[in-house]
Amino acid sequence: MYATNVGLFNIIPPINCGIITDMSKQNEGKVAVHELIVQERSFKIISNEFKILNSTFINKMPVNYFRFIAETNNLQDMSQDDKHNAAIALRMGYFHGLETLFSVLFAALQAPKAVIGWLDLYKNQDIKEIINKIRTGERITTCFPFAPPSWKKSSDLIHFGLHLDDEKLNYEIKELFANTWALFADDFIAGEYNKIKHGFRIIPGGRNIKLGDKEFIGGEFGTSWFSLTRINRTDNYFLGQAVHNWNPDYLTRALKLISLSLQNIKAFLLHVNNIDKPKIYQFPLNPSLFYEELIDMRPELVRANLSLGYKNLK
C-alpha cells in the first residue's frame, strides 16, 4: 500500500535564515550564537554543540510512532467498552500526531538548522497562528521563498527531493500531502485535544443531530463536552455543549499519513543540514485514491456547537 523513494537533491533550496555568529574571540572556547524565528518572535541560542545536537535529533526522529499507535489500537474482536477506549486512544494519538506534524513542519520552514530550538520555544498558539496565516495567505517569515504561503507550497518544498519517473504520480503525491495537511489543520484548530488531555472532560460516543427536517448521522464514535462561554467580559458564563463525531478508520489512516509526513519532513531536514544519511520519502501507492477514501471515512457531520437546551440532540 505504501512505497519509498530515495530523495535526489541536485539543487539546494536557497536558505535565508539561521545566522551563526562565531563568538570565540569574546569567549573562551568555540561558542556560537544561533538566531531563529518562532512565529514572528526572534530568539538567540548560545551553544558550542548546537549543530551536533540538532543533527542527532533529526536523525533519531521517531517518525513511525504514530503508525504504531494506529496499528496497536485495532478495534476488531474487542468488547464494546474496549472499542470506545481504543477509539479514544486513537483520537488522542491523532491530536498528538497533529501537534507533532505541524510543529516539525513549521520548524522546518522557519528554522531548519535549529529544529531543536524551535520545538522547545514554540507555543500551541504559534501553531494556530501559522495555520491561520497559511489559510489566508498572510506573510510568514520563513527560510525559503514562500510568499504567499499555502499548503501546496509547503508540500512542494518538503518534497523538493522527490523525483519519480512518473510525473503524474510525483504531482499527486505532493497534492495528497498538501490536501491532507489542510484537512488536518481544521481538526487541530477545533480544540478537542485539550478536553481529552486535561481532566478527560468528554462524554464518549457519536451523536445524531436533527436540524429541521434534516438529520445528520454521526455514527457510533465521537466525543461531546460541556463548554463555558464568557458573557460580555463579565464573570458570567453561558453553558453550552459541543459534539464531535469521528470514525476510527479515518483516524487509523490519518495516523499512518502523519507518520509518512514526518518521514518526508525528516528527509528534507537531513538534506538541509547536510546529514550523511539516506533521504527516504514514503507515500501511498495510489495517492488520489488514498485521499478519496480518507474523505469518505469522515462522518457527514464532523462537529457542531449546541445550546445545552437543544432538544434535537439524541
Image (cartoon, rainbow, N blue to C red):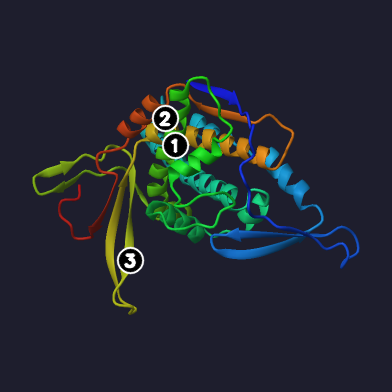
Q: Residues within 10 Å of mark 1 (few under 14, many from 20)?
A: many
* Element under disc 3: strand
| Residue name at image x 22 percent, y 60 percent | 307
Whichever of labels 2 and 3 marks the residue nearer the N terminus, that label is: 2
Kind of residue at badge 3: Leu
The percent position of residue 311, horizontal first and vertical second, equals 15, 54
Kind of residue at badge 1: Ala
* Element under disc 1: helix
261 vs 76: above or below: below
Question: How many marks can you see?
Answer: 3
- Residue that label 2 marks: 75
The percent position of residue 308, horizontal first and vertical second, equals 23, 60
| Residue name at image x 43 percent, y 31 percent | 253
| Residue name at image x 65 percent, y 50 percent | 115
Q: Nearer the viewer, mark 2 or mark 3?
A: 3
Residues under numbered marks 2 and 1 in contact, where contact means CB atoms less than 8 Å apart: yes
Q: Nearer the viewer, mark 3 or mark 1?
A: 3
Examine the rendering and report whether any part of residue 199 can be seen: no
- Residue that label 1 marks: 86
Task: Tell me if 251 is positioned left or right of 54 in this view.
Answer: left
3D distance between C-alphas at marks 2 and 1 = 7 Å
The disc label shown at residue 228, or none: 3
The percent position of residue 175, horizontal first and vertical second, equals 42, 34
